[in-house]
Amino acid sequence: MSKFDWNHALAFWTTVEEGSLSAAARKLGLTQPTLSRQVAALEQSLGVTLFERLGKSLMLTEAGLDLIEHVRAMGAAAETVRLAASGQTQSIEGRVTISASDGFAAYVLPDIVHRIREAAPQITLEIVASNAFSDLRRREADIAIRHVRPDQPDLIGRLIKESEAHLYAAQSWVEQNGMPRHPADLARAGFIGLGGGARLAGHLQSRGLPVTEASFILASENSVVVWEMVKRGLGISFQMHEIAARTPGIVRLLPQIEPFPVPIWLVTHRELRTSRRIRTVFDLLAEALILTPQAALRDGADQSRTSP
């Protein structure tokens, strides 16, 4: 076997990750013929075929499947070396990318970002608002706010606190429909769901609510859209306390119902914490997230004297 060339392995790895030669070439800043030659050179040096070419599509062969895991490990090791080296030379200036769910990014992060900007104005913040997990290992984000514990060995997570989700409606909805006193009072109420109604109905039934899939009169995959519809009195939904407490005109319903636990984790790549700017933002995020929202949220007990 001839001398191993990392550039050839990188061309192979990127092609697998991007799904096509053209996309991989764009990512690496190469022409497609150059990238193809590098992949072919790797195949020749190893004496194996890595891809089956089916028309315009590529499919990994058995040899390719075996090799890609080793190449991924090599790439992760190379990235670890780069991050460790850059972390020792980086100043506190620069860009830090924070990933969070769309609702958390829209309603909670702006206040926190303001605090971070006051404490570290030289750092540029980029917010990735997505309900899908950002891949921290591929640097889609530097820090992620998640509601589940990370399970990848090269990620570290810090449980900031255990939050809760409760049932909420707009004050205008209460004025029109009355304040519910018991779960049975919501048998004919309209709910607004994040995603499909069947799964959410099961969660609500576990809390003793007489809810079926038909109870969900509105739904969206975007939690900002769901919450905006709740704010306009179009229905009822569960929401995190941190978001509801920042929303004027929102009432907590049936406070006797057991809330849903919502853990808040801060997650980053293990090696990224050697970067001063990322460590600074991580610590400022943790400090801000621990604080209880200052806004007081009225619940059903408070509303009993004024509700129709």
Image: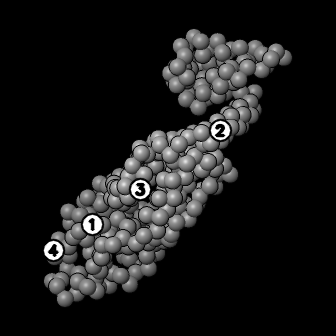
In the rendered view, tell whether residue 291 sits above or below residue 9. Answer: below
Label located before the other in sequence (4 or 3): 3
Residue behind mark 2: 85
- Using residue 100 as the reference point, say whether residue 306 is left or right of it: left
Q: Is tag 3's residue or tag 2's residue first in the polypeptide sequence?
A: 2
The answer to whether 5 appears left or right of 36 in the picture is: right
User: Percent position (x, y) of residue 133?
Assistant: 51, 49
Instruction: State whether residue 268 is above or below residue 231.
Output: above
Where is mark 1, residue-wise? 247
Q: Nearer the viewer, mark 4 or mark 1?
A: 1
Dot 2 alpha-carbon crowd within 10 angstroms: few under 14, some 14 to 19, many 20 or more: some
Closer to the eye: label 1 or 3: 3
Pointers 3 and 2 in contact (C-beta within 8 Å)? no
**Mark 4–mark 3 CB contact (< 8 Å):** no
At which x and y percent is residue 160? 52, 66
Q: Which residue is mark 3?
A: 119
Q: Secondary structure at mark 2?
A: helix
Cα distance between the residues tagged 3 and 2? 26 Å
Residue contact between numbered discs 1 and 3, judged by CB atoms under 8 Å: no
Instruction: Report which quarter residue 260 is drawn in.
Output: bottom left
Can residue 216 be seen here? The reply is no
Q: Residues within 10 Å of mark 4 (few under 14, many from 20)?
A: few
User: Residues under labels 1 and 3: Cα distance?
Assistant: 26 Å
Quadrant into which the C terminus falls: bottom left
Callout 4–callout 2 Cβ contact below 8 Å: no
Q: Measuring from the top left, give residue 292's x and y in whole percent.
A: 40, 72
Q: Earlier in the sequence, mark 4 or mark 1?
A: 4
> Residue at point 20% right, 66% down?
233
Residue closer to the observer: 33 or 62? 33
User: Tag on residue 259?
Assistant: none
Q: Residues within 10 Å of mark 3 (few under 14, many from 20)?
A: few
